[in-house]
Image (tube, rainbow, N blue to C red):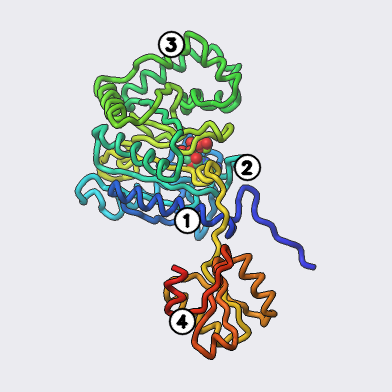
Amino acid sequence: MAQIIKVLKGTKDILPQDIEMWQFIEEKANKIFSSFGFKEIRTPIIESTDLFSRGVGETTDIVNKEMYTFEKSDRSITLRPENTAGVVRSYIENGMSRLSAPVKLWYKGPMFRYERPQAGRQRQFHQVGVEMFGIKQPQADAEVILTAVNFLKSIGLNDLEVEINSLGCPKCRAVFKENLKEVIRPYLKDLCEDCQERFEKNPLRLLDCKVPDCQQIYSKPEIQKVITSDFLCEECSEHYTELKKYLDNLDVKYSENKHLVRGLDYYTRTVFEIKSNNLGSQNAVCGGGRYDNLVSELGGEPTPAVGFAMGMERLISLLPEKTPSLSDAFIVSNNPVEAFKLAQYLRENNINTEMDLSNKKFTKQLEKASKTAKYALILGEDEIANKQVSVKNLETSEQKTVSYEDCIALIK
Ligand code: ATP
Ligand code: MG
């Protein structure tokens, strides 16, 4: 026998028995995001590598270690590790800045990151997300957070924790970065390898290191004093205070987390995450924030923007399992031509119908019907002669012989 080829490490099939969960959250995403005025956009899965090295940032784990990059006709191409950069590229390329603000877009689809596969972490995974362009006021941040919370509620996740923080603007953040480096420098040699590297390249990222020894160092009083210091300039501080006021008034429960910095370079001011206690160490279902400089860094007119991305696998793992639904009807008959005709009629009337395709015995067909369908539709010789069908409710075992038209009403 030929050797079996297996699915790649870190990737998964989404099987028919699981697909209803996916369809459920995709439909809710469409419904809730639309209710906030977001329109769906679908960008290519492959993009120029430059888009991510410039858009996501040279100092991020994603660009440094996690991208699937290959050459084709002398061009460097990358499978998208996230969708914000692609949406921003499309926004610029399609002149969406000419549309009246805000421009609100949402997306869903697969993302690719070469990470160590573990619970809650795959190499191909899926995200849904939104991006809002053109509004600098904190109302936009509030509306985006509200969109996330409403969507999570709509799929039955009410008790997740929203964490927020403000990273300030490049100006006030620069001072903060320097202060942080100064107090951490004495401990540099005790930090994990990643943190030693982050120290120069991206010192903010030190704060969300998951290594306990590093966190213990960062909890030292002199370092905490800097972390919890109020480093925001007046405008950034006002923006953050206003955002919190909106969230308070909208009854969005949140907590402030000074260690929340997010992995991507492009964030300015607001960052947020939504977490679950039921997910172990990969506990974030949603990450987002404001990125006022990304559009101009990718060559567009300066345009403020804010958005989020959610991991769909992690959402699904938090939801109760669904048993796959039964089909509406299974036709039991020894007359395939007549069975096909009835099946066709029912399917045209939106009734999910199956029938025997391999000349099985009547009793075998009935058995199959009782396992897979809500109704068995029996087409014996008498029924066919009278242009009727015997409809058996497989839950109650009630049976009734009716015309084809009445059969539809009965099932619906
Ligand atoms: P983490 O700190 O978990 O690596 P991140 O900052 O890399 O997260 P984002 O890029 O903000 O994550 O992605 C948003 C969401 O996408 C995450 O909160 C998570 O739910 C999901 N996600 C990210 N990477 C993966 C992955 N490799 N496998 C499954 N889901 C993922
Ligand atoms: Mg990551």
Instruction: Find disc 2 in the rendering and name its residue.
Output: 117
- In front of the other: 168 or 32: 32
User: Which label number is shown at residue 23?
Assistant: 1
- Residue 138, percent across and down? 26, 32
Q: Is residue 341 left or right of residue 301?
A: right
Mark 4 lies within 8 Å of ligand 1 (Cβ measured) = no
Label 3 SS: helix
Mark 3, residue position: 225
Between label 1 and label 3, give the one nearer the viewer. Answer: 1
Which residue lies at the image location 24% right of the left edge and 33% below the top edge?
137
Residue 269, given in percent of the width and then of the height, sits at 33, 29
Q: Amino acid at mark 4?
A: Ser
Q: Amino acid at mark 2?
A: Pro
4 or 2: tag closer to the N-terminus: 2
Location of the N terminus by quadrant is: bottom right
Say which residue label 4 marks. 403
Q: Residues within 10 Å of mark 4 (few under 14, many from 20)?
A: some
* Residue 342 visible to an observer of this rendering: yes
Residue 272, compared with residue 155, is above or below; it is above
Mark 1 closeness class: few <14, some 14–19, many ≥20 residues within 10 Å: few
Q: Is residue 150 above or below residue 181?
A: below
- Three-letter residue code for mark 1: Gln
Q: Quadrant of residue 177?
A: top left
Few, some or many residues within 10 Å of mark 2 (<14, 14–19, 20+): some
Q: Where is residue 141? Give x, y as percent.
A: 31, 35
